[in-house]
Amino acid sequence: MSEPHDPTGPRRHRPHKDERVSLERALSKLGFASRTQARGLVEAGRVRVNGRVVQDPLARVDVRRARFEVDGTQVRAERRSYIALNKPAGLVTSERDERGRDTVFSCLADANLPRLVAVGRLDRESEGLLLFTNDTRWAQRVLDPAGHIQRVYQVHIRGDAPDELLAALRAGVTSRGELLRVGAARRVRSDGAESVLELVLGEGRNRHIRRMLEGLGREITVLRRVAIGPVQLGRLGAGAHRTLTPAEIEALGGAVGAGAEAGRTRKPGPEPPAGGRRPRSPRDRRGE
């Protein structure tokens, strides 16, 4: 007997995509705790998965389908947040600083945000645009070199900036066995005593621009990231932050998921006082 005609066309079975990850990572992806914190909770017997206590942090769980509880309270995914910060110089971008130095999370401590991680990094001496999110998939897309997302930097150096310097930056400088180059270089202004350059990176390496200019014998006085793809630093004050617009989120890493917080802006504020409370950040190779 033939099957009845379906006016909507043939049905296609769409199997559920397995989202199995380690339990400690699942709690981190849900925004509940860092993986280190989650590991401690699991090993202490405080975490239940589908009603059963699990004490193995590496146990594989389906982050989308499983029910998670910590101390009897269900863990739910936090709203998605996408933040742009104007990082002041002097702050480190790291999960925890072993030397007790102030971190970029001191700028977000009083903002009533969910747990976030930094998307990329800037070294302690550098300043400018730094992104944060709790959407790990989006962050991975932003950091993926295949996305060809350009980073734009404004760099102040001592002395003049002849055409030969710009050509050398484009051609590349070998540092620690790596050939480093910029995608574009132009002179913004120069008065002989100081020059300002605009440099563009696609795929970057750790301290990429600093290593290049140091290799060419030039001293950097200010290194500021002013753009990541379509996201501009603009007039955002030092230490101030804003949420990205839906268009910016889409352009950088794909569509905004349900529950995303986007489009609100916060008035730029003064540079925050020293002191950090909530250091949280991953690492990546895109640097200045």
Image: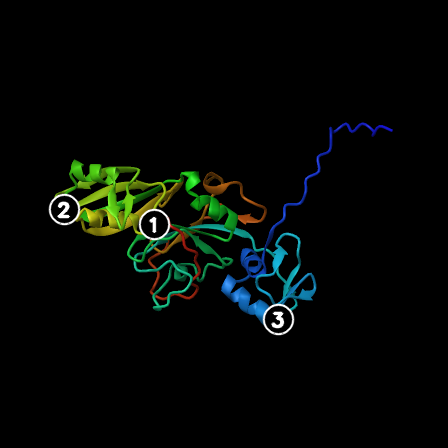
* Within-10-Å neighbours for mark 1: few <14, some 14–19, many 20+: many
Front-most of 49 and 100?
49
| Upstream in sequence: badge 1 or badge 2 | 2
Q: Nearer the viewer, mark 3 or mark 2?
A: 3
Q: Is residue 225 left or right of residue 79?
A: left
Give coordinates of residue 35: x percent, y percent: 51, 62
Give coordinates of residue 159: x percent, y percent: 14, 46
Residue 23 visible in the displayed image: yes
| Upstream in sequence: badge 3 or badge 2 | 3
Residue positioned 74% across, 29% down in the render: 8
Give coordinates of residue 156: x percent, y percent: 22, 47
Mark 3 touching mark 1, by CB under 8 A? no
Q: Quadrant of the N terminus?
A: top right
Front-most of 87 and 150?
150
Measured along the vertical axis of the image, is residue 169 above or below residue 261?
above
Q: In the image, what residue type sits under mark 2?
A: Gly
Q: In the image, what residue type sits under mark 3?
A: Gly
Q: Give the Cα separation between the discs numbered 1 and 2.
A: 24 Å
Residue bearing the label numbered 3: 45
| Upstream in sequence: badge 3 or badge 1 | 3
Residue positioned 24% across, 37% down in the render: 171
Instruction: Give me the disc on residue 159.
Output: 2
Residue bearing the label numbered 1: 287
* Within-10-Å neighbours for mark 2: few <14, some 14–19, many 20+: some
* Within-10-Å neighbours for mark 3: few <14, some 14–19, many 20+: some
Q: In the image, what residue type sits under mark 1?
A: Gly
Q: Give the Cα separation between the discs numbered 3 and 2.
A: 61 Å
